[in-house]
Amino acid sequence: MQRLFTGLQPSGSLHIGNYLGALKQTVELLKDADGLVMIADYHALTTLKDTEQLRKNIPEVVRDYVAVGMDPKKTIIFQQSSVSQHAELAWIFDCLVTVPFLMQAHAYKDKVAKGLEANAGLFTYPMLMAADILLYDTDIVPVGADQRQHVEYAREAAAKFNTAFGETFKTPQEKILESVAVVPGTDGKKMSKSYGNTIPLFGTKEEIQKAVMSIVTDSTGDRPENVYNIHRLFKSEEELDALYTEHKGKYKALKDALVEDIEAMISPMREKRASLSDADVKEILRDGAARAREQAEKKMVDVRQKVGVSI
Ligand code: ADP
Ligand code: TRP
């Protein structure tokens, strides 16, 4: 079985673009893989400096993972900070790579290009991510296209270590999730939390209604394109042709139909999410951390010996 590893930063609520564009495919891949999914809380610290917010977001990600269909008995769901071997290995990688090499990283370059000051954590972010991936002999890393470079950095870190100290780390491969096309937001642009045009994945029915009713419609074409383009993700072209012909010009009825379709997808997930108690979430994280730590420590015993700190 292939080993799958992926992670999400605990940085806020998911929208249907995240689900249809990425999470759904990861859940599919997990059916035939031995998987670990991580809550990248130490990575989040590179940008988030709000104690309460971080503390609140971490269990939310666990709920999201389980609600979209991950089985915590099978897949290891864990918090990065609970397995200190990640930070430990990241330090060793930091000592192997050069400053100019890390200066090529997009996340760092973008920040500097905007005239912002990058913290040292953001600068070495790729080496912590390399440690995440490499500790577990990962084969595949399902991520969005924006994370491709980070997986390349992980391969590079593995190669540098293997050259210096002998074969230790497996070479991971990114599995870029080709989105079901880009999911458009309520204004027709790409749905993104930074544009404020999202339909929340776990919103209440009222919140979904509100978001759908705010979809921008223009009265020039035959059908409201922005509504139709989201609707396409839920129904076949034939079904939509019939529906949009029947309700031609009646935007409210079409939006109501879209709300129903989104609800049908979300409501079972929402129920699953609500069925998890705080104690369940804690138990998932406790169990996940113990299972991840055991594997990570095994790898670190070898690494410490190879670099020479185990005497
Ligand atoms: P946001 O743009 O809201 O900040 P993220 O960058 O956190 O979203 O996205 C996490 C993952 O979800 C991405 O790697 C991408 O694959 C997927 N994703 C996000 N928005 C969309 C979208 N509008 N359509 C398709 N996939 C998306
Ligand atoms: N950097 C990823 C993001 O921002 C999150 C992440 C951290 C990750 N470690 C990972 C993803 C390891 C895949 C594998 O989305």
Image (spheres, grey):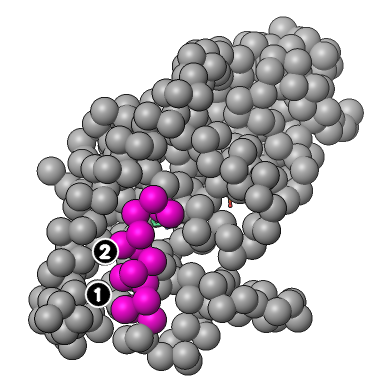
Residue 134, which numbered label? 2
Q: Looking at the picture, how far across and down is residue 30, in whole percent?
A: 28, 37
Q: Is residue 21 above or below residue 219?
A: below
The quadrant of the rendered image in which ligand 2 is seen is bottom left
- Can you see residue 239? no
Examine the residues drawn in magenta and state their main secondary structure: helix
Tell whether position 85 is magenta: yes
Q: Quadrant of the C terminus?
A: bottom left
Q: Which residues are magenta?
A: 80-94
Q: Is residue 84 above or below residue 26?
A: below
- Can you see residue 205? yes
Farthest front residue?
311
Residue under label 1, please give it: 158
Residue 61, which numbered label? none
Q: Looking at the picture, how far across and down is residue 56, in whole percent?
A: 61, 38
Tell whether position 83 is magenta: yes
Mark 2 surroundings: few (<14), some (14-19) or many (≥20) residues within 10 A: many
For the point 61% across and 47% down, the residue is 54
**Mark 2 and 1 residues: CB-CB less than 8 Å, in contact?**
yes
- What amino acid type should be assigned to the residue bearing mark 2? Leu
Judging depth in this view, the residue of 90 and 190 nearest the camera is 90
Q: Tell whether 305 sits left or right of 276.
A: left
Q: Tell whether 310 sits left or right of 61.
A: left
Q: Is residue 53 above or below residue 253?
A: below
Judging depth in this view, the residue of 300 and 112 nearest the camera is 300
In terms of image quadrants, where is residue 291?
top left
Q: Earlier in the sequence, mark 2 or mark 1?
A: 2
Q: Looking at the picture, how far across and down is residue 162, in whole percent?
A: 17, 80
Give the secondary structure at mark 1.
helix
Q: Tell whether 42 sits left or right of 243.
A: left
For the point 17% across and 63% down, the residue is 299
- What amino acid type should be assigned to the residue bearing mark 1? Ala
